[in-house]
Amino acid sequence: MRQHLAHVTLLVRDYDEAIAFYTNVLGFSLTSDQDMGGGKRWVVVAPPGSASGSLLLAEAKTDEEKRGVGHQGAGRVWLFLHTDDFWRDYPVLQARGLHFLEVPRSEVYGHVAVFEDLYGNKWDLLEPLG
């Protein structure tokens, strides 16, 4: 059996503001933006060089979904952006306006710093060691 995760759904306030953030600030590629009718779109963004794993951006419509924007991880880091060179990417992302919540640190598992996206979701920028 061979499986992999294809997409993780991320609730957003607005498709276009989310696309702008993920492409202009994080440098992701917009791999799909299809009109599904009724104001719904199939919007997928992926990190540069990613062979698999992407975000399906879902515009919040209901009150419950709107309350979930920025809180899908319940205040914890729940998304992990791996890089092959932390010290190359960290200053570039800072210069693009990415809000880091801490200074970079080295852990036994790698170089890491927590950042938040435009909605307040917490992420790790991580260069794994080994």
Image (cartoon, helix red, strand yellow):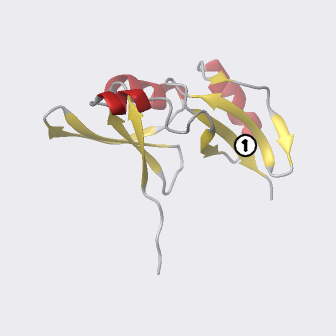
Disc 1 residue type (three-letter): Asp
Q: Residue at x 46, y 31 (%)?
A: 23
Depth check, front residue: 73 or 87: 73
* Left or right, 49 with reference to 108: left
Across and down, in percent, residue 88 comes to 72, 35
Which residue is at the far front?
Answer: 64
Q: Quadrant of residue 120?
A: top right
Relative to 57, say whether 117 is above or below: above
Across and down, in percent, residue 47 comes to 52, 43
Give the labeled residue for mark 1: 85
Relative to 96, say whether 71 is above or below: below
Check disc 1: other Cα within 10 Å, few if <14, some if 14-19, many if 20+.
few
* Left or right, 9 with reference to 35: right
Q: Quadrant of residue 17?
A: top left
Depth check, front residue: 130 or 58: 58
Across and down, in percent, residue 113 comes to 73, 34
* Left or right, 109 with reference to 21: right
Q: Secondary structure at mark 1?
A: loop
Depth check, front residue: 77 or 125: 77
* Left or right, 27 with reference to 20: right
Relative to 73, say whether 8 is above or below: below
Q: Residue at x 24, y 38 (%)?
A: 41
Which residue is at the far bottom?
Answer: 1
